[in-house]
Amino acid sequence: MPSKNTAAIDPQATYLTLINVYEVEPDWQAELAKALSESTENTIRHQPGFVSVCIHSSLDGTKVVNYAQWASKEHFEGFMKKPETQEQLKQFAALATSVAPSLYQVSAVHAA
């Protein structure tokens, strides 16, 4: 069973998944990853319907991927409608050369 600090990807769960790919200059990768992490810890994780966020930094330094799970699409949309959310997203985008968010559902999970 996952610990409280571990995100679980479960195809049986009805979570909404956001995968957001930020392209960055290598000099900005660590700063963007830190900004996403701090915002999640201080604000996002306290929002209704929040489940988890995993932040990944590519080995070549050119991408940061934010994998977020929300209890429902309605919870996610409520979070996105907040003016403070939009302001924070603008700050993240300012550190990136491009941002590509998409919404998903988990279709399958394979593990050892």
Image (tube, rainbow, N blue to C red):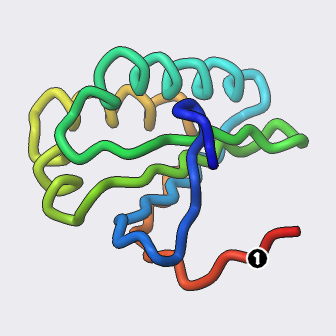
Q: Nearer the viewer, residue 62 or 102?
A: 102
Quadrant location, the C terminus: bottom right
Q: Residue at x 76, y 22 (%)?
A: 27
Q: Is residue 46 left or right of residue 7?
A: left
The residue furthest bottom is: 107
Q: Residue at x 31, y 30 (%)?
A: 44
- Residue 83, given in percent of the width and then of the height, sits at 10, 33
- Residue 66, given in percent of the width and then of the height, sits at 55, 46
Position above or below: 53 against 102: above
User: Where is mark 1, residue-wise?
Assistant: 110
Residue type at mark 1?
A: His
Q: Residue at x 89, y 41 (%)?
A: 59
Q: Nearer the viewer, residue 73 or 95?
A: 73
- Residue 56, given in percent of the width and then of the height, sits at 69, 41
Position above or below: 14 against 54: below
Callout 1: helix, strand or loop?
Answer: loop
Count of marks overlaid on the render: 1
- Residue 91, given in percent of the width and then of the height, sits at 38, 26
The residue furthest front is: 1
Q: Residue at x 29, y 21 (%)?
A: 43
Position above or below: 76 against 34: below
Position above or below: 91 against 42: below
Q: Is residue 85 left or right of residue 6?
A: left
Q: Is residue 33 left or right of residue 16?
A: right
